[in-house]
Image: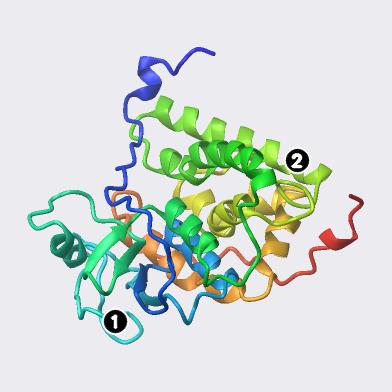
C-alpha cells in the first residue's frame, strides 16, 4: 500500500505524544489520583474503566473545567476543584513533576499522591493499569486469549476513528481533511459490518476495545458531525453501530460518565479557530436510552 501523497500530508493534524509513561501497580488504596476533564474522550476512557473495575474508593478523581483557554485545563472551583494538591491549572502538575516543563499539557493525568508527581498521562496505559490492579473487582477487559484481536482493532480504531475525527476537524488543507474523513468512514462502515456479525467487537464479551471506541461514538452526532465536518453519515444512520452505542451507554454506571453538556460546551466554546462565535448548538435530539435490542440479535 502506498503512503499518503505530499499534498495530503500538508496541513495534516499531528497529535503531541504523551511524555510521562511510567507503569505502576495500583496496589495501595488512595495513593493514586486521577485528574480528568469529562469532556475529553481520552479522559473518558479512564473514567469508564475506573468505574467498571470498581476502583472509585481506591483511586480518587478530580474534574477539570470543560472550558479551556490559553492557560490550559483549569480548576475553576465548585465541582472543578483539586482537593489533593490545590492546583489552579493542570500545568502545575507538569511543572511540579518536571521543573521547567514547556511541552504540551494534556489530560488525563495519573498522579502519585505520595511522591507528588505525574506517573502517567497516556490514557491507553492508565486503563491497562486499572484493569490489571489487584484492587480491581470488575471484568478483565484485556483477557490473554483476546489480546491479539484487541490490539489489532485498537490500532485501526485509534488511527482512523478516535484520532481520525481530530485529523478531520483540525486539518488545514482540503486534501488532508478528505484523506482523514474518508479513512474515518471506511472504518465506521467496517465496524458497522463487524457488529452485524457479532454483539461486541471481539465477540460476545465486552473488552477494552469496545470501551476505547465508545467515547468517540457518544460524541459523534453531538459534536463531530458538525464541528469536525465528519458528516458523510451520522451515528444514528448506522444499523448496528447506533444500537451498539446505546447498549454500551446503558451498561450499569456508564451513563453517569457521559456529560453531554460539558462535551458540547468544551468543543464549541474552546476551539475558536473552528467556531469563533462560541455558540453551542441545541441539538441534535438523540436518545441513548432508547431500547437497543442487541440482546435479541442472533449470535
For disc 2, the marked residue is 194
Examine the rendered structure and indicate whether residue 283 appears above or below residue 104.
below
User: Residue 154 got which mark?
Assistant: none
User: Which corner quadrant of the image does residue 156 belong to?
Assistant: top right
Image point 19% across, 63% down: which residue?
91
Image point 36% across, 18% down: which residue?
7
Q: Looking at the image, tell me whether mark 1 or mark 2 is earlier in sequence order.
A: 1
What SS does tag 2 mark? helix
User: Which corner quadrant of the image does residue 48 belong to?
Assistant: bottom right
Residue 216 as seen in the image, left or right of residue 123: right
User: Which corner quadrant of the image does residue 186 belong to?
Assistant: top right
Image point 58% across, 40% down: which residue?
151
Examine the rendered structure and indicate whether residue 107 appears above or below residue 76.
above
Q: Position of residue 194 (x, y in %)?
A: 75, 40
For mark 1, does the 10 Å Cα neighbourhood hold few (<14), some (14 to 19), or many (20 or more) residues?
A: some
Q: How far is the residue under mark 1 from the one under mark 2?
A: 42 Å
What SS does tag 1 mark? loop
User: Residue 81 got which mark?
Assistant: 1
Residue 5 as seen in the image, left or right of residue 292: left
Q: Nearer the viewer, residue 131 or 283?
A: 131
Is residue 48 among the parts visible in the rendering?
Answer: yes
Residue 247 as seen in the image, left or right of residue 45: right
Q: Position of residue 78 (x, y in %)?
A: 31, 87
Is residue 277 among the parts visible in the rendering?
Answer: no
Name the residue furthest bottom: 78
Q: Are marks 1 and 2 in contact (CB under 8 Å)?
A: no
Examine the rendered structure and indicate whether residue 2 appears above or below residue 249.
above
Name the residue furthest top: 2
Q: Position of residue 159 (x, y in %)?
A: 49, 37
Image point 56% across, 75% down: which residue?
54
Q: Position of residue 148 (x, y in %)?
A: 63, 38
Amino acid at each position: 500500500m502506498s503512503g499518503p501523497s505530499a499534498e495530503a500530508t500538508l496541513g495534516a493534524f499531528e497529535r503531541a505524544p504523551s511524555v510521562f509513561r511510567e507503569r505502576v501497580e495500583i496496589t495501595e488504596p488512595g495513593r493514586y489520583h486521577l485528574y480528568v476533564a469529562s469532556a475529553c474522550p481520552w479522559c473518558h476512557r479512564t473514567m469508564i474503566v475506573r468505574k467498571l473495575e470498581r476502583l472509585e474508593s481506591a483511586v480518587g478523581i478530580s474534574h477539570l473545567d470543560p472550558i479551556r483557554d490559553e492557560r490550559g485545563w483549569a480548576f475553576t472551583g465548585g465541582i472543578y476543584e483539586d482537593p489533593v494538591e490545590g492546583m489552579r491549572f493542570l500545568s502545575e502538575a507538569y511543572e511540579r513533576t518536571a521543573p521547567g516543563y514547556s511541552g504540551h499539557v494534556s489530560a488525563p493525568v495519573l498522579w502519585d499522591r505520595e511522591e507528588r508527581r505525574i506517573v502517567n498521562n497516556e490514557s491507553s496505559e492508565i486503563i491497562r493499569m486499572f484493569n490489571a490492579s489487584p484492587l480491581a473487582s470488575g471484568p478483565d477487559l484485556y483477557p490473554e486469549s483476546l489480546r491479539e484481536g484487541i490490539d489489532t482493532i485498537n490500532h485501526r480504531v485509534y488511527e482512523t476513528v478516535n484520532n481520525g475525527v481530530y485529523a478531520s476537524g483540525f486539518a488545514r488543507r482540503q486534501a488532508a481533511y478528505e484523506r482523514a474523513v474518508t479513512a474515518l468512514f471506511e472504518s465506521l462502515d467496517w465496524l458497522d459490518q463487524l457488529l452485524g456479525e457479532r454483539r461486541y467487537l471481539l465477540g460476545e464479551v465486552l473488552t477494552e476495545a469496545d470501551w476505547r471506541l465508545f467515547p468517540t461514538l457518544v460524541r459523534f452526532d453531538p459534536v463531530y458531525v458538525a464541528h469536525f465536518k465528519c458528516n458523510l453519515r451520522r451515528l444514528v444512520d448506522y444499523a448496528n453501530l447506533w444500537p451498539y452505542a446505546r447498549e454500551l451507554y446503558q451498561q450499569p454506571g456508564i451513563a453517569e460518565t457521559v456529560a453531554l453538556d460539558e462535551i458540547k460546551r468544551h468543543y464549541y466554546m474552546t476551539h475558536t479557530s473552528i467556531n469563533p462565535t462560541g455558540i453551542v448548538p441545541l441539538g441534535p435530539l438523540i436518545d441513548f436510552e432508547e431500547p437497543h435490542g442487541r440482546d435479541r440479535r442472533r449470535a
